[in-house]
Image: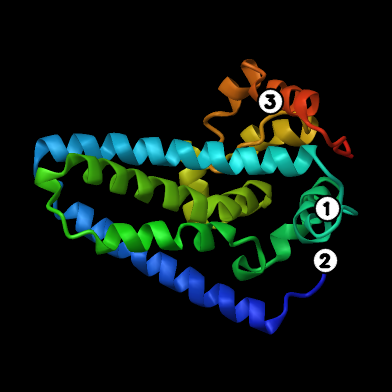
Amino acid sequence: MEEQGRVLTFTKYIVVLVSTGLLITLFVKISNNLLSKELFVIGVVAFFVGYLLADLLTGTVHWFCDTFFSENAPFIGPIIIASFREHHTHPQLFTKDKFIEQDTTSFFVLLIPLFIAVSNESSYSNDLNSFFWHSTLIGLSIGAFGTNLFHKWAHQTNPPLLAKKLQKMGLILTPDRHNKHHRDYRKSFCVTSGWLNFLLDHTKFFLTLERFIRLFSYKSYEPRT
């Protein structure tokens, strides 16, 4: 993989720091309202929904990039598809990368939603919808921001102690959950927590979606390699 340019690295650092700062600010803002039993329950449920959503969305991106196009496709090939295909042939290679060298798209995508949520001045006690969606956004952001780390830790033979504890608790992707994907690249695409893999595999969700897209698409996408 080509070395990441300085301008891109600097941009990533700025966006990662700003997005993380906004996430922390929103978390503090939400936490100040958890003394109410009602808001506490809503907040926990919403966080769980957001974390599941992160698993689904990042898994969907993973599925799409594993399934369609090739690394030779114009624009999208070398920028996005190539890294996914490289991971299949050299699964341990990305464990040597620094966090900032990995995909940080989620920090860019969630920057604006986090900013809007932090800027919201409404009282949560009078606006339960905002409280629910902001709590969901926290769960989504934590899951999306951590996905590449969780994936990396699932491949490492000796991940950090924190990673081992989270894996043991089942809160993040475990090696066992992820090994199913490397045994069969048509299964177990979710790499945040991997909680949804069993359901999505059992219902053949992604396989059905792939067939639907190929059936109604005017373009013949190249199959995965």
Q: Left of 60 or right of it: where is 14? A: left
Q: Residues within 10 Å of mark 2 (few under 14, many from 20)?
A: few
Q: Which mark is residue 1?
A: 2
Element class at badge 2: loop
Of pointers 3 and 2, the one earlier in the residue sequence: 2
Q: In the rendered image, which residue does mark 3 sit on? A: 209
Locate the C terminus by quadrant.
top right
> Which quarter of the rendered picture does the N terminus lie within?
bottom right
Question: x and y percent of residue 123 in the render?
Answer: 12, 52
Secondary structure of residue under mark 1 = helix
Q: Which mark is residue 86?
A: 1
Q: Which residue is located at x 60 percent, y 23 percent?
A: 200
Q: Position of residue 150 (x, y in %)?
A: 57, 50
How many neighbours does mark 1 have within 10 angstroms: few (below 14), some (14-19), or many (20 or more)?
some
User: Relative to residue 6, is residue 34 depicted above or below?
Assistant: above
Q: Are marks 3 and 2 in contact (CB under 8 Å)?
A: no
